[in-house]
Amino acid sequence: FTIELEEPVFKKISNSAGSFYESIVPIRFDDGKFIGFLYIKAKADKISSQKTSTILFFFFFSFLCLIISSTVIIYLFNSQISQKIDSVIKKLNLLSEGKLNKADHSSYTNDEIGKLQQNINYVNQKLVEIVQNILVGSDKLTESSSHMNSIAENVASGSTLQASNSEEVSATMEEIAS
């Protein structure tokens, strides 16, 4: 080419030898002075097959990356949830066995499982309070029962004394009457 091109040219050319893509790009110095051309000619079927293989390669590795990242995310998500649910199950098993603990002051998350953990600990705390109130009531009942027993013993001894006094009075009355 002896003609100076201003813009690059890209064309598809078909002839008896087949289809080709041709590209002609002018090369210039930084100051804009023309040096020459870059000429590239490639068979259209090779470019098409490379394009197809590049697209397939891209989709395959994109799909592979998607599967790997999804697997990692699902694993991490499930392990976090599984740990929290296992903690809740252990606490419920302890409650069902009657093993009441003092309040668990571990940190809770703001999700549903964290709220469930807080409520289970609240139930545990209330059950501990109920058991403590029952123990206090039982102690008071035992104390009252002891007091009632001593009163009953005093009444019984007073009744026995009164009965013996009544027998003496009755015996004295019989002696006087005879």
Image: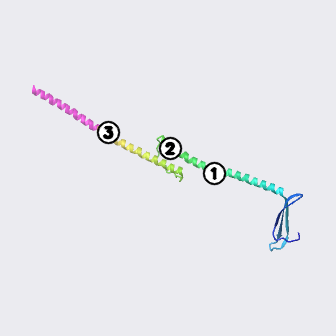
Look at the numbered discs 2 and 3 and tell me whether their residues touch, using CB distance below 8 Å: no
Magenta stretch contains residue 166: yes
Residue ID at (51%, 51%): 115
Mark 1 surroundings within 10 Å by alpha-carbon count, few (fewer than 14), some (14 through 19), many (20 or more): few
Q: Is residue 156 left or right of residue 38?
A: left
Residue type, mark 1 in image? Ile
Judge depth for marks 2 and 3 and give the one in front.
2
Q: Is residue 113 left or right of residue 2?
A: left
Q: Secondary structure at mark 3?
A: helix
Judge depth for marks 1 and 3 and give the one in front.
1
Q: Which residue is mark 1?
A: 73
Q: Residue furthest top?
A: 178
Picture quadrant of residue 139: top left
Q: Secondary structure at mark 2?
A: helix
Q: Main secondary structure of the magenta part?
A: helix
Look at the numbered discs 1 and 3 and tell me whether their residues touch, using CB distance below 8 Å: no
How far across and how far down the image is residue 85, in percent?
55, 46
Magenta stretch contains residue 154: yes
Residue ID at (49%, 42%): 94
Q: Of 91 and 147, which appears nearest the observer?
A: 91
Mark 2 surroundings within 10 Å by alpha-carbon count, few (fewer than 14), some (14 through 19), many (20 or more): some
Above/below status of 18 relative to 35 = above
Residue type, mark 2 in image? Leu
Residue type, mark 3 in image? Ser
CA gap between label 1 and label 3 equals: 65 Å
CA gap between label 2 and label 3 equals: 37 Å
Q: Which residue is mark 2?
A: 92
